């Protein structure tokens, strides 16, 4: 009986792999401090596909990645919990690009960035969320846009939908708690939106396990 090697990363097409290298090359050249040490970061960026990934993709390597992400998220929560508002704004505000690009504008996970800039790796929570909410299709139709028409497994969509639900709930709490909503109508629309998301999650949960989830009239209405 053959033993299948666990799959830890998505298979990237050549242009996708080049986009990853272009986007995050500034982290490699500057050896910038961050969640990952330089050797681990280099493995993730440069060995993002091809034969090299089989050298990097060990159980221990990815166990280490999972631990780093878990502890890194806890570190971010610690910083957000004890930091003054003005300092938090410097850390967590949306990135505002000056619009001056020295090179060709590139696109990675629907995010535009300057591929020639040493700051192309800069990100914020909204850009990070785009990457997290981008499932890897189980199959492609090369005549159509993969992000819209690819086939996705229920399990790959469900945990993302649950994450969306919690994020929306926290955002709604913020809007209501600090009296940002200007009318009762807006409050009702917000409640309907939350209920709609929860309803779609229940519909998705009732689909057959790990069957490709498609945009059917009796199923998930869209992400």
Image (cartoon, rainbow, N blue to C red):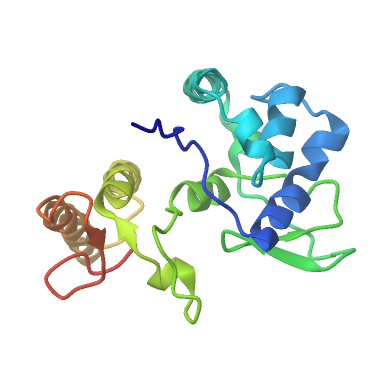
Left or right, 75 with respect to 186, comes to: right
Asked if residue 37 shows in the view, the reply is yes
> Is residue 117 depicted above or below 103 in this figure?
above
- State which quadrant residue 181 falls in: bottom left
Q: Position of residue 121 (x, y in %)?
A: 73, 45
| Identity of the residue drawn at 27% across and 46% down | 155
Residue for point 65% across, 30% down: 55
Q: Position of residue 74 (x, y in %)?
A: 48, 20
Tell me: residue 7, above or below residue 161: above
Relative depth, front residue between 93 and 163:
163
Seen in the image, is 2 located left or right of residue 194?
right
Q: Quadrant of the C terminus?
A: bottom left
Position in image of residue 21 (x %, y %): 75, 48
Position above or below: 152 against 125: below
* Residue 29 shown left or right of residue 171 in the figure: right
Q: Residue placed farthest to the right in the image?
A: 102
Question: Which residue shows up at 69% across the image and 25% down it?
Answer: 40
**Looking at the picture, does residue 132 appear above or below residue 85?**
below
Which quadrant, please, contains the N terminus? top left
Q: Is residue 96 visible?
A: no
For the residue pair 219 and 211, the one nearer the viewer reads as 211
- Residue at the image position 35 percent from the left and 46 percent from the top: 171
The picture quadrant where one finds residue 35 is top right
């Amino acid at each position: 009986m053959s033993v299948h090697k666990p799959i830890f990363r998505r298979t990237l097409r050549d242009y996708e792999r080049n986009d990853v290298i272009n986007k995050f090359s500034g982290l490699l050249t500057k050896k910038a401090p961050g969640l990952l040490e330089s050797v681990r970061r280099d493995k993730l960026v440069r060995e993002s596909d091809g034969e090299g990934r089989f050298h990097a993709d060990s159980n221990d390597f990815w166990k280490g990645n999972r631990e780093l992400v878990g502890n890194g998220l806890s570190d971010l929560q610690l910083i957000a919990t004890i930091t003054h508002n003005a300092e938090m704004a410097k850390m967590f505000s949306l990135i505002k690009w000056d619009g001056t690009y020295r090179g060709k504008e590139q696109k990675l996970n629907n995010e535009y960035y300057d591929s020639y800039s040493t700051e192309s790796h800069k990100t914020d929570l909204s850009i990070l969320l785009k990457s997290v909410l981008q499932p890897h299709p189980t199959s492609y139709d090369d005549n159509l846009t993969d992000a819209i028409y690819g086939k996705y497994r229920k399990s790959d969509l469900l945990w993302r939908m649950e994450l969306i639900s919690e994020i929306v709930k926290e955002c709604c709490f913020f809007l209501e708690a600090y009296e940002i909503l200007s009318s009762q109508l807006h409050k009702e629309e917000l409640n309907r939106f939350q209920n709609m998301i929860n309803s779609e999650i229940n519909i998705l949960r009732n689909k057959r396990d790990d069957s490709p989830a498609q945009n059917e009239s009796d199923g998930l209405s869209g992400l």
